[in-house]
Image (cartoon, rainbow, N blue to C red):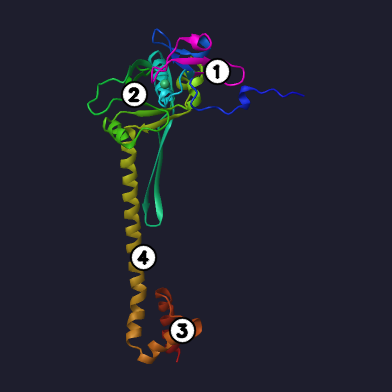
Amino acid sequence: MASTVTRRDLPHDDQYIGYGLNESGELVHVDCVPRGKACGCCCVSCAEPLIAKQGEIRVHHFAHAQQNQCTGALETLLHRLAKEILSAASVFILPDYTWRGERALRDQLVKLEKTIVSGGRARLSQVLIEPRVFEEVVPDVVLTTQARDGSARTILLEIAVHHSVDAEKQNRLRELNLPALELTLMPEHARLSRSALAARILNNTAGKCWLFHPRELECERRLEELYRQELERQRREQAVRAKANEGRAEPIRQAVKSMPKSDVENPMAEFFAHHGRYPTVLETADVFREAIAKRKSK
Ligand SMILES: [Zn+2]
């Protein structure tokens, strides 16, 4: 029986792109253009001519007409597609944000976990693409969401394809003290139809992760407060313990002082003979307590 090879059986080539730029400069999906060189499209990254591959076996995609070293097509394409989709969007699903922090205190951890954003459907009143409104940093997208009570909120959105936002940009975003979200897109998203990609970006929490939220600062302060409270509690407890130990140790110390030297050395030697080691600090108190009791009973 002849087996049928389907598209699903073949490994995906991660560099396959599903969109090219047509003569009008618009991104068009490979299924919406004539086959082969007749597609009339070029690469969004290097501007070289593309060929529309619409075969039966491999997933439909665009290939560069000439073998070249174009490596940025996938990332450039996904950034541009995502920005186009967001520009036209009126709703956007936000993910929850549960802040988790901990601080080590001796052998324990002081922890705090708090949900600072309850995600869900947000209505967009404005979407700005790479706006130059901040001095230090240009966010990929700035979303303005409109709450039911009419209040507006600004959210910075970073689009990540191969790598997440680097630490330097993350710090700059943080300095703006505005909520910042990262949207991660995968290479296979570069072949989705526009509507499927829009559903992935707008109606989904997958691939969305908060980079920063101003409410984190309140959590950090609260964690610091909990840490200090716990430190204070441990200090008080330690002081009480030390005082109690002092009370217990003093009579023994006094009794040991008044004992003949041999009575002090012998219990230690006896302990060594029995255990093959000298007593620990805690055991020493017991050793002498016994020695004193023995001496009294003589
Ligand atoms: Zn290219």
Front label number (4 vs 1): 1
- Residue at the image point whose x is 74% and y is 23% from the top: 2
Q: Name the residue tied to disc 3.
A: 272
Q: Residue 171: give x, y in percent of width and height.
A: 29, 35
Q: Name the residue tied to disc 1.
A: 60
Say few, some or many: other residues with alpha carbon within 10 Å of mark 3 (under 14 / 14 to 19 / 20 or more): few
Q: Earlier in the sequence, mark 3 or mark 2?
A: 2
Q: Is mark 1 within 8 Å of ligand 1?
A: no
Q: Earlier in the sequence, mark 1 or mark 2?
A: 1
Q: Measure the alpha-carbon separation of dots 4 and 1.
A: 74 Å
Amino acid type indicated by mark 3: Phe
- Disc 3 secondary structure class: helix
Quarter-wise, where is residue 121 in the image? Answer: top left
Q: Name the residue tied to disc 2.
A: 140
Q: Is residue 222 magenta?
A: no
Q: Residue 52: give x, y in percent of width and height.
A: 51, 14
Magenta residue span: 33-62
Q: Name the residue tied to disc 4.
A: 241
- Disc 1 secondary structure class: loop
- Residue at the image point whose x is 37% and y is 74% from the top: 248
Amino acid type indicated by mark 1: His
The residue sitting at the left extreme is 135
Q: Is mark 4 within 8 Å of ligand 1?
A: no
